[in-house]
Image (tube, rainbow, N blue to C red):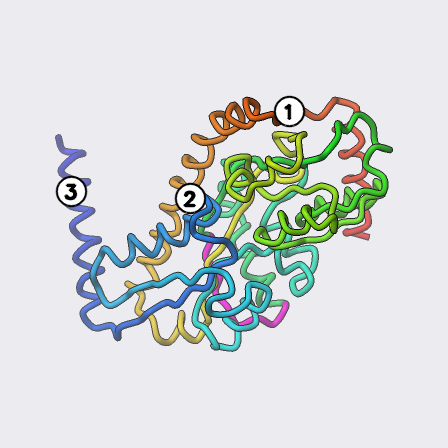
Amino acid sequence: MIKKLLSIVAASLVSFVLMVNASFAEPVLLKVPVWFPTTLPALGTSPAWVAKHINAIGGDLTMKTYEPKKLVPPKEMLEAVSKGQVNAGYTTPGYNMGKLGDKGAIFSAVPFGPDAPEFLAWVYYGNGRKLWQKTYDDAGFNVQSIPCGIIAPETSGWFSKEIKKPKDLKGLRMRFFGLGARVMEKLGVATSQLPGGEIVPALQKGAIDATEFSMPAIDKRLGINKILKYNYFPGWHQPATLFDLIVNKDTWNNKMSSGQRTIVELACRAVMADALAMGESMQFDTMKENAAAGTINKYWSVKMLATFKKQWDIVVGEMIA
């Protein structure tokens, strides 16, 4: 009973502090263009979830999401937020490797790296978040990064044929994300990092032969399973994938009150649990449905995993040389 009362008192104090702080704050509307359609479960629903719960508070802070290309093109989002053309955006550092370097991809997903709990432990209670922010700062971007979404293992490839040995990959043109693309390139795959909405058209036109994008439930929303038969899950390349809300630093530091910043931080922490649970809850039903419709779900063989790991070790050596 005492613990319960203390919890109630603590919650009341937090609410009081936030309300008092908000009463002295100027209204702030975060306009958030997103990389992913908000209809995509976990991947796209996270920023919409954050906006919904921030707006439900009914204070001086509100948030509105904009579908891809509606406010700024996804590939221009980082610069637009940094310059103050928009005051916020929802992305993942791996999509900005060309601007942040290899370090950017580390804060999205690491091949053969940490799973979701370990990744979050490092971000929140290790030095991860500090290094994450430093990556943006060192690259000269005027943005504040707030970790704001996570998904569990992704599919590591949709193919038109079974991949039994490394040479089966050679010569393929494949959409592939982040540092995992470096591994595939070592095996003779020509990789490209297409946005989700361009994958199916590229497959239909024959511009690419294979792809990975996200978890089976998300890939199904795009229709990838209707074109390619073999699905390799779970993926070695993205055991977990992190996303962030980026806010223009002038907005974050000078226009937002500490209470408003706290609300954003808490909403982004909360969506971590929602996104992870949502993603995990959908995978196996989706894979069963896909199998019934003709998809062949596969695990990578021990030999293939060893091949990927060997090439990843080579990539790591090149990165730190």
Decide: is 50 above or below 154.
Answer: below
Q: At 31% across and 57% down in the image, what residue appears?
A: 263
**Hey, what amino acid is under mark 1?**
Ile
**Hey, what amino acid is under mark 3?**
Ile
Q: Pointer 2: what residue?
A: 272
Q: At 58% across and 37% down in the image, what residue appears?
A: 154
Q: 72 or 20, which is in the foreground?
A: 72
Q: Earlier in the sequence, mark 2 or mark 1?
A: 2
Report the Cα–Cα distance between label 3 and label 2: 24 Å
Q: At 60% across and 35% down in the image, what residue appears?
A: 225
Q: Residue 310's quadrant in the figure?
A: top right
Tags 2 and 1 touching, CB below 8 Å: no
Tell whether 138 sits left or right of 48.
Answer: right
Determine crowd level at label 2: few under 14, some 14-19, many 20+ residues with C-alpha closer than 10 A.
Answer: many
Chain part drawn in magenta: 139-147
Q: Pointer 3: what residue?
A: 8
Find residue 88 and report its horizontal and vertical position in percent.
44, 67
Q: Which secondary structure, mark 3?
A: helix
Report the Cα–Cα distance between label 3 and label 1: 51 Å
The disc placed on residue 7 is none
Q: Earlier in the sequence, mark 3 or mark 2?
A: 3
Find residue 213 and report its horizontal and vertical position in percent.
61, 44
Q: Is residue 248 magenta?
A: no
Q: Pointer 1: what residue?
A: 296
The extreme front residue here reads 205
Quarter of the image with the N terminus is top left
**Hey, what amino acid is under mark 2?**
Met
Decide: is 305 above or below 111.
Answer: above
Q: 184 or 83, which is in the foreground?
A: 184
Nearest to viewer (mark 3 / mark 1):
1
